Amino acid sequence: MMRLMDLPPKKRRSRRGEPAPEAGTLVVRGDVLDPTELRIDAMENFEVYGYWGISTFAEVGGFDLAWIAAHKLARADWLAVFRTGDVVGAGLELWDTGQSPHYDVVHDDVDELVGRLVACPHRIIRNPTESSGGAP
């Protein structure tokens, strides 16, 4: 089990100070939920920022799924779509990091972060901006 360590982060990722999205708000991650890839992303986030986090985008501030898909996740063939209430209900946190509508899904244990996110209710949809691509 890997936990947060007392190593100084290479960079500091500031929180925007926004309230958490409402329970019904969509949270979107590019591509399918491959535990190996999620773990790598969380570990890279830890190396840079000092916490276990997985990058997502939320429908906040007038940004909707179509805009997120076209402008933030255009390279992803598939999108994993969650509801904020399900993510938080799984014991995960949503941190308002970077520029809106970016959020990191966070937990203080990388194994729990990956396991809980994969087990969290979600749906996989084809990216509406993607005209080709294989099966998820």
Image (cartoon, rainbow, N blue to C red):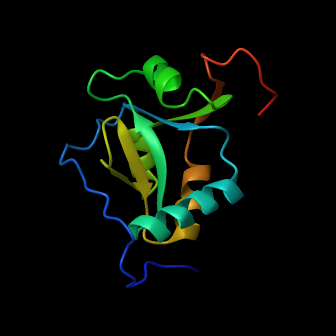
Q: Residue at x 32, y 46 (%)?
A: 98
Residue nearest the viewer, comparing 89 with 135: 135
- Name the image quarter holding the C terminus: top right
Q: Is residue 126 above or below residue 98?
A: above
- Name the image quarter holding the N terminus: bottom right
Residue nearest the viewer, comparing 89 with 41: 41
Q: Is residue 67 visible?
A: yes
Q: Is residue 74 above or below residue 112?
A: above
Q: Residue at x 64, y 32 (%)?
A: 76
Q: Is residue 122 left or right of residue 32?
A: left
Q: How many marks?
A: 0
Q: Which x, y percent locates residue 104?
A: 41, 51
Q: Is residue 8 left or right of residue 126?
A: left
* Residue 38 placement: quadrant: bottom right
* Residue 12 placement: quadrant: bottom left
Q: Residue at x 34, y 37 (%)?
A: 23
Q: Which x, y percent locates residue 95?
A: 33, 52
Residue ranking furthest to the right = 134
Residue ranking furthest to the bottom = 6
Q: Is residue 108 left or right of residue 98?
A: right
Residue ranking furthest to the front = 10
Q: Is residue 52 visible?
A: no
Q: Residue at x 29, y 21 (%)?
A: 62
Q: Which x, y percent locates residue 5?
A: 43, 83
